[in-house]
Amino acid sequence: MIYSVGQVVFDYIFHLKNFPKINSTTYVQNYGEFFGGAAGNVAVVCSKLGQKASIVSFVGDDFKGSAYERHLRKNRVDLTHLRAVEGEKTARAFMFNDSKGRQISFFFWGAARRFHNAPIPNLKLGEGDVIHLANGSPEFNVRFARKYPGVSFDPGYDVVAYGKGEVKEILKNTRFLFCNEFELKRILKLLGIKEKELFAFPLEFVVVTKGSRGSSVTTEDGSFDVPAVKGKLVDPTGAGDAYRAAFLSAFLKGESLKRCARVASAVSSFVIQKYGAQTNIPSWREAVARVEFV
């Protein structure tokens, strides 16, 4: 089982030719409402790839009976630890993408505010189960990792909300670290260390995603790069979450780290080909076929 901890979000994705200047207007070429949030994205990708997945998150009272809830149930995602907060709306993300693939985002926390002071749930962890901490409250994630050491940690865009003490505390209890280049630089700057010094913490590996330039995987013994699997870019939303979910799914299947990275890259290449983070997720067989093809 992979427990995906973080936000469940209704994504509103807008596509523009160019971003407007301050106090000016531009035309929206198209837009849509999609299922998102790092916890939701990771859980659905894992389930599609054949892994059991459970979400630990908070939603509003507008979530029950929604298309998103039906979507999660259809994809066999366990919702035991998905809590509805009365009187609150489910979190919303408003993402604006331009023709160059750049993005500006606005986020409404809604029910996700509950993360800040919520108790850590009691999970019945089995052998081989993984807890993946995605975006959300740094304080909540620190407490979660302290209760269940050996987590997979992805700070995501919330990396800017973490202080030095919080990063140190969570890394003390982290087994797998996932981040993009900006997030890695932020962590290293906060701690005042170099990348190789991360292994003073009990990390098994560090994965850094680099967009169209692929990804790198580093262990105490060295590092290697894996190129991106090419796919026609329609919408980048959720590509990073898909990579992380696929990497963990492959890892739990016993694949080598290099194979994990290649499968993860292949899954991401599917996701970017359609609008929305959960619209075009491949099966394990489809992902592996694309790996073999390239």
Image (cartoon, rainbow, N blue to C red):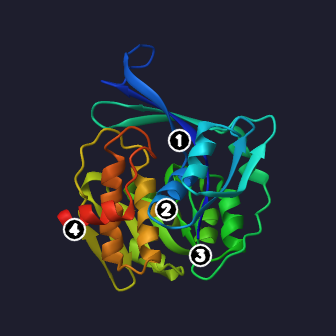
The residue to which callout 1 is attached is 35
Residue at 40 percent across and 77 percent down: it is 196
Q: Residue type at mark 2?
A: Cys
Residue 166: quadrant of the picture: bottom right
Quadrant in the picture for residue 68: top right
Quadrant of image for the N terminus = bottom right
Question: Contact (CB < 8 A) between labels 1 and 3?
Answer: no
Q: Amino acid at mark 4?
A: Glu
Query: Residue 226: horizontal and vertical position, in percent?
Result: 26, 67
| Cα separation between marks 2 and 4 | 20 Å
Residue 157 appears at what percent x and percent y? 50, 49
Marks 2 and 3, how far apart at CA: 13 Å
- Please report contact status of discs 4 and 3: CB closer than 8 Å, yes or no: no
Instruction: Categorize mark 2 by other alpha carbons within 10 Å: few (<14), some (14-19), many (20+).
Output: many
Taking the view exactly as shown, the residue that stands out farthest to the front is 74
Label drawn at residue 129: 3
Q: Earlier in the sequence, mark 4 or mark 1?
A: 1
In this picture, is 218 found above or below 45?
below
Query: What residue is shown with label 4?
Result: 292
Q: Which mark is residue 46?
A: 2
Determine the residue positioned at 30% across, 59% down.
266
Could you say which is closer to the camera, residue 213 or residue 229?
Answer: 229
Q: What is the x, y in percent for residue 84? A: 76, 45
- The amino acid type, in three-letter code, at marker 1 is Phe
